Image (cartoon, rainbow, N blue to C red):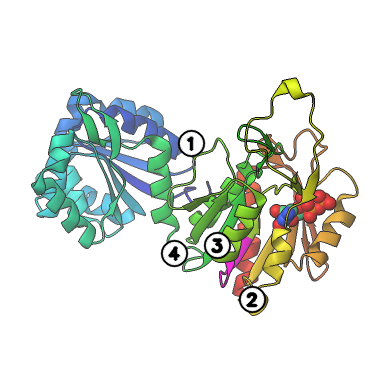
Amino acid sequence: MSVLASRRILLAVTGSIAAYKAADLASKLTQAGALVDVVLTPGAEKFVTPLTFQSVTGRKTYTDADLWGGEAHVLHVGLGQRADLMVIAPATANTLAKLAHGVADNLVTILALAARCPILVAPAMDAGMYEHPATQANIRLLQERGVYLAGPGEGRMASGLVGLGRLLETPELIGHIRLVLGRHGRLAGKKVVVTAGGTQEPLDPVRVLTNKSSGKQGYALAQAALDAGANVVLISAPTALKPPVGAHLVSVQTAEEMKDAVLVEAEGADALLMAAAVADFRPKTVAPDKIKKQAGAPQLELEATPDILVAVAGLGSRRPTCVVGFAAESRDLLENADLKLHSKQLDFIVANDITAPDSGFGVDTNRVVLLFSDGRKLPLPLMSKEQVAEAVINHLAGFLEHK
Ligand code: CTP
């Protein structure tokens, strides 16, 4: 999560029962390397204490008690000016109303008025309060002024009501924070298409042929491209993963469906990162009804699926500016990857040896070599799939900058 490393985040917590969840957010942001300054409203202090936040951030937590101290002036201007982003989570209906109308009657609202950094609000309130025309109008006004909105989510509230008004969960809040922090990154304004997961080729209505791909590397690439400010389309075969916040998800099942989606999305795009493990073969016929075991073990006749990267090469001048392939090999890694680099007309290929226990399918780490069309080879050390994704995105950005 290098988009968060050393970034200054001013986290304002207001008086909602969801305030306790803000402690987890402060903790996860700190673990990701961000410098988190927390400010509590008097309402928030009824639910959580400054010590809670001080303990997870290792930094002083501010309250209205600091508003009237000797450092007050420095504080209300300084905290807001130093920050890269102000996050108000949870943001109550009351605080949103104050922000919309420029009321500055506590440290949080003063900071919001003085801040020159972007502001992200994550509403949390009872469904009735959220849907009230006054709250809706306040949120619209804030958005028109450039305030970013995260959520709320739908679900069960503390009151027992079910509806819109829940504070988003920490990973989603962090996704929104990453989007705002990354918006001016090296890929800002670029369209990046990423494919992920293992395609499934149906045999009958309940059975499929597939592979062991988890989709982790592709989803990490989509996140890294978002961190760099790209507009990301994630074309995904079925996985157990949540798509990163901000990615436009196109769900597919088969190689054929993935090819169709890629040809639509990648045409004229800035980059295609083909991380999906596309099935090379599919059953020649799909049984309309479930194959019954009484008939004995069936003989499977397979046929080749289309090669998506070869189809992309056929786009000619409408081909993406940079096309990146992935090669999962169990032997002759560099020779095989080099063959694919040229036969599929790639700009570079990410090769990994799937026989190593710490690399490839299902595990969280990868050990890859990047092979470029000009003959350069760059072996990377053992890394997490997130770090591999960041390295690939950095090379992609460099490639596009020199085009
Ligand atoms: N790929 C593709 N269409 C296919 C199969 C693979 O576009 N039908 C892409 C993969 O997404 C990957 C690259 O081609 O980026 C290499 O995939 P890989 O499975 O390693 O190679 P194959 O071309 O399938 O060759 P082989 O199975 O013989 O290794």
Mark closest to the chain's N terminus, 3 or 4: 4
SS assignment at label 4: loop
Q: Name the residue under label 3.
A: 192
Image side of residue 329 versus residue 389, left or right = right
Mark closest to the chain's N terminus, 1 or 3: 1
Residue bounds of the magenta highlight: 266-272
Q: What residue type is labelled 3?
A: Val
Residue at the front extreme? Answer: 295
Instruction: Decide: is 50 above or below 11.
Output: above
Front tag of 2 and 3: 3
Residue visible at 33% across and 37% down?
A: 168
Q: Name the residue under label 1.
A: 31
Does 105 appear in magenta?
Answer: no
Residue visible at 36% across and 36% down?
A: 59
Q: Name the residue under label 2.
A: 402
Can see residue 64?
yes
Please say if the residues under marks 2 and 3 sit with CB atoms less than 8 Å apart. Answer: no
Please rate how many residues cluster around mark 4, counting C-alpha atoms within 10 Å: few if below 14, some from 14 to 19, many from 20.
Answer: some
Mark closest to the chain's N terminus, 2 or 4: 4
Does 269 appear in magenta?
Answer: yes
Mark closest to the chain's N terminus, 1 or 2: 1
Quadrant position of the C terminus in the picture: bottom right
Q: How far apart are marks 3 and 4 (CA)?
A: 15 Å
Please say if the residues under marks 3 and 4 sit with CB atoms less than 8 Å apart. Answer: no
Image side of residue 43 versus residue 151, left or right = left
